[in-house]
Image (cartoon, helix red, strand yellow):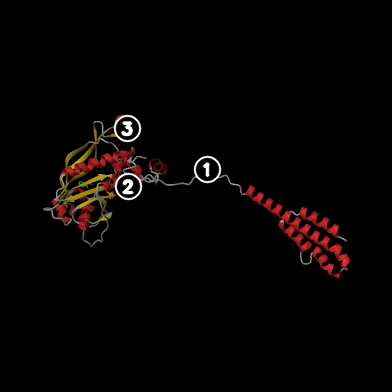
Amino acid sequence: MDGITGLREKYLRYIAAAGDMDTLENLRLAALGKKGEISLKMRALGQMSAAERQVAGPALNGLKSEIDAALKARRAALEDAILEQRLQAEWLDVTLPARPRPSGTIHPVSQVMDELTAIFADMGFSVAEGPQIESDWHNFDALNIAPEHPARQEHDTFFMHRAVDDNRPPHVLRTHTSPVQIRAMQSQGAPIRVIAPGRVYRMDMDQTHTPMFHQVEGLAIDRDITMAQLKWTLEEFCRAFFEVDEVELRFRASHFPFTEPSAEVDIRCSWEGGQLKIGEGTDWLEILGSGMVHPHVLRAGGIDPDRWQGFAFGMGIDRIAMLKYGIPDLRAFFESDLRWLRHYGFASLDQPSLAAGLSR
Ligand code: PHE
């Protein structure tokens, strides 16, 4: 029939050449759409004689399915090509190392606080807290520190502001963690086993002193607590904290207004070749102050000194952090130098636990 060969050639050629889906769709409409060339021819079958129709009908049907098949094949080919193109363009090397993400480190002071909290928790101590801006009474009077005691003098203590005509003693930035002893006694009564790590402030600045530093207070009160338990607790702590089996502590008689008797505690160490070793050698390093809680202090905390007694200690956290991790200068702790923090800081997953060991 007229034109069929021409149409076939034309559409097969165009379809083969179609480079994208839009072109292909336009070709489909042009051939097989409602007003497409082939559709119009099929519609024209109705006006033909039966004989003509018998020839033209199958020929047109054949053409229609041939074009249909060609369109489908071309569509599949184009889809494959598009997919191939995407696979090329969106290719990703999953074996490449990930982009570095800057991450901070845990400050040695925080790390050491976590470590000592874990160790004392194992010995039955819980953590107590108090304010850093402390009343004069909690920081001094309640701790049996008389008004004329040198620790009260302006050069040691930071005082808060009071209005000119306000004659109450000004609050202070706590000069030690010992006021938390009083707060713990008042809030929980006896018996007590607490530690209180935190910031303290003194007007002091040189290679081994900063105006803000950290202490941990310890307080154990019960019916029959003695210096022997104080000694055991501190030895046990040092063994676990410094990770040495043999630690030797030296108790030196001392004086604190809030303990009687009082002792300062040194730890045996050696400085061979500039390398500090805990537990051996002939040197001694002072690490804390301690003693049996003074009856005046128990009374100030609302505890009857005829029925209860106990020990207390105050240890410098920055000091023991320097000792354990070989950090030479205290001032660097608080300078926020990123290089220092990266070097001495800890990964956030270096969580202390007694079972896992404490070393990095
Ligand atoms: N508060 C004392 C200080 O800062 C340490 C200490 C605490 C001493 C508890 C004895 C008992 O030096």
* Residue 350, horizontal then vertical, whole percent: 38, 44
Point 82% across, 57% down: residue: 8
Quarter of the image for residue 105 reads top left
Q: Amino acid at mark 2?
A: Asp
Q: Residue furthest bottom?
A: 47
The Cα atoms of the two marked residues, 1 and 2, are separated by 33 Å
* Residue 99, horizontal then vertical, whole percent: 51, 45
- Report the number of discs: 3
User: Between residues 260 and 6, which one lies in front from this camera angle?
Assistant: 6
Q: What's the mark number on residue 149?
A: none
* Residue 354, horizontal then vertical, whole percent: 31, 43
- Residue tagged 1: 97
Q: Secondary structure at mark 2?
A: helix
Image vertical order of residue 150 relative to residue 7, above or below: above
Image vertical order of residue 272 relative to residue 211, above or below: above
Q: Amino acid at mark 3?
A: Gln
Mark 2, ligand 1, within 8 Å: the answer is no
Point 18% across, 39% down: residue: 251
User: Between residues 243 and 26, which one lies in front from this camera angle?
Assistant: 26
Q: Residues within 10 Å of mark 2 (few under 14, many from 20)?
A: some
Image vertical order of residue 238 relative to residue 169, above or below: above
Quarter of the image for residue 10 reads bottom right
Q: Secondary structure at mark 1?
A: loop
- Residue tagged 2: 114
Q: Amino acid at mark 1?
A: Pro
Q: Specify whether 349 is left or right of 301.
A: right
Point 73% across, 60% down: residue: 25
